[in-house]
Image (cartoon, grey):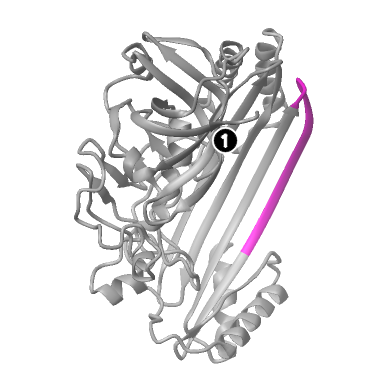
Amino acid sequence: MRDDLFQQVLDAAREQGVTDIEAIVTTDRQALTRFANNAIHQNVAERNMHLSVRPVIDGRTARASTNRLDRDAVRAVVSDAIAITRLTEPDPELLPLAEPLPVAAIDRYSLPTAEATPEHRAQTVAEAIRIVEAQGQTAAGIYSTGDTELALFNSRGVRVAHRETMARFSITAMAADSSGWAKASACDHRELAPAALAQSAARKAAASCAPREIAPGHYTVILEPAAVLDLVGQMFLDFSATAIRDGRSFLNDRIGKQLFGANIAIHDDAAHPLQSGALFDGEGVPRRLLTLVEDGVVREIAYSRQAAAQAGVAPTGHGFPLPNEMGEAPMNIVIAGGDIPLELMIAESERAILVTRLWYIREVDPYEKIFTGMTRDGTFLVEDGKIAGGVRNFRFNQSLIELLSSVEALSPVERASGEETFDMVVPALKVRDFNFTEVTRF
């Protein structure tokens, strides 16, 4: 079907005298079971097909899209894209369409996940609710399953495609004056362990009851992987040649310099077994493994085709579909871990704050990468190697540069799923001198 669809796009473009055209076809099926107050209250399913086309005409380009894929709709969207392109100002930096390059194959498709039924999700949710309810708590969350197919074609011969499944389970356990949270995602729903996630959330809610208030200040902090993702994940749009050229990256004048601690190594690795997504970018260019940070030194950044041509280097396969203002960015982040499990971090801490997750994260200083935000759903005081109880949530004001220069220990990595950024492969971090500025009201 995809080949036939692209042939229709190509024929419609040639009828109007256009020979250079790109098409992106996506098919997306998603099903979601939502629960709250210890009961399922929503079950929805959605299927979408989407066609997006981009001609290149005399140094101009533009894009038009449709979710109708009959022949008349295909001809109409091609005509719209051509008309918009001809009205667009020429871009002297625009490159011709990409040439075909080999893209490695990767299997991220799970048939049981694609075929997961509402009954399966309901039974899984019911078991999780029973675990939380048995502790006298109230459960809320979601369980979603779905599959996506993506194909990119162009008239110069690029033919790349990717399909994958994805499942996500998130649960919040709520007690009278405390809460606990857990979330996971995986291409195969059988890797999620929802019952274990429910048990974790319930334990956190129970352990953080009657939270005490302690003074804000600088503390040794143990950030669980979800908290690492939500905070450290804020900086990776800056690892972009376009962002650096535009002067909107904190890496300006810092590449090749010691920026973080010597124990920090970060890669962009689309082929990592815990990652997800396609092995090609928005123009069909293969994604290359990037060493973003090595021994605390910023080594590499992402280049789209256009940014690479301007810099006289090879593209890295991290460009977004054109036209766009962002250029490129690494999207498959892997922060190298260590060999100290979270439990040992706690056991070896005389006094620390254990943080489950963060929210309402906002940037304060773009160049020093200072962010503010709040803890939630499980914030604990650690004393003499043990969790001494829950504490009231804090607001923080923290530089990511200082944070990644103050890491004392790293756990083994896991795939982390949060709310603020895309999923990443990260460790838990033990960090000294984390800056809590005030106690929050909730």
User: Residue 177 at what x, y percent from top left?
Assistant: 68, 17
Question: In the image, what residue occupies the spot 31% across and 13% down?
Answer: 348
Question: Of helix, strand and loop, which mostly describes the magenta segment?
Answer: strand
User: Which image quarter is the N terminus in?
Assistant: bottom right
Mark 1 neighbour density, 10 Å: few (under 14) some (14–19) many (20 or more): many
The quadrant in which residue 2 appears is: bottom right
* 114 with respect to 73 (left or right): left
In this rendering, the answer to whether 80 lies above or below 109 is below
* 409 with respect to 201 (left or right): left
* 15 with respect to 435 (left or right): right
Q: Amino acid at mark 1?
A: Ala
The quadrant in which residue 70 appears is: bottom right
User: Residue 290 at what x, y percent from top left?
Assistant: 28, 52
User: Which image quarter is the C terminus in?
Assistant: top right
Magenta stretch containing residue 307, yes or no?
no
Question: In the image, what residue occupies the spot 72% across and 25% down?
Answer: 122
What residue does disc 1 label?
167
Q: What are the residue bounds of the magenta stretch?
A: 36-50
